[in-house]
Image (cartoon, rainbow, N blue to C red):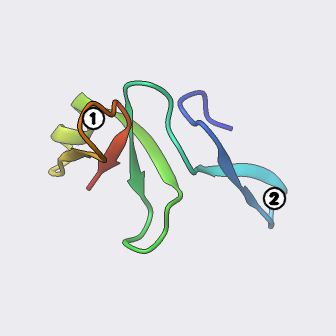
Amino acid sequence: CHSSCDGCTENAMTNQADKCTGCKEGRYLKPESAAGQSGTCLTAEECTSDTTHFTKEKAGDSKGMCL
């Protein structure tokens, strides 16, 4: 599991933890696909610099999505 992840999906081909399913405090999940919930966890700075923006899931929630 990546250090910034809070939960991971397993990569069946390599039998290793692969993508993040959730992010630790202050990190934002950037899904691999529009439908998928697994992806990578970015800081707010990484998220906004990647021609994307992060959204809070709900008011006061530190966890959000990088879309």
What residue appears at the point 37 percent right and 72 percent down from the top-left corner? 34
Using the image, tell me which numbered label, if any, was put on residue 16: none
Residue for badge 1:
46
What residue appears at the point 50 percent right and 29 percent down from the top-left corner? 24
Q: Quadrant of residue 67?
A: bottom left
Residue for badge 2:
14
Using a 10 Å C-alpha cutoff, classify the residue at mark 2 as few (fewer than 14 neighbours), some (14 to 19) or many (20 or more).
few
Q: Amino acid at mark 1?
A: Glu
- Residue 42 in percent (x, y) is at 37, 37
- Residue 28 in percent (x, y) is at 37, 39
**Residue at disc 2, secondary structure:** loop
Mark before the other along the chain sequence, 2 or 1: 2
**Residue at disc 1, secondary structure:** helix
Q: CA distance from mark 2 to mark 1?
A: 27 Å
Q: Amino acid at mark 2?
A: Thr
Using a 10 Å C-alpha cutoff, classify the residue at mark 1 as few (fewer than 14 neighbours), some (14 to 19) or many (20 or more).
some
Judge from the rendering whether residue 19 lies leftward or rightward of residue 55; answer left or right. right
Judge from the rendering whether residue 6 lies leftward or rightward of residue 17; answer left or right. left
- Residue 60 in percent (x, y) is at 27, 30
Q: Quadrant of residue 49?
A: top left
Judge from the rendering whether residue 63 lies leftward or rightward of residue 39; answer left or right. left
19 or 62, which is in the foreground? Answer: 62
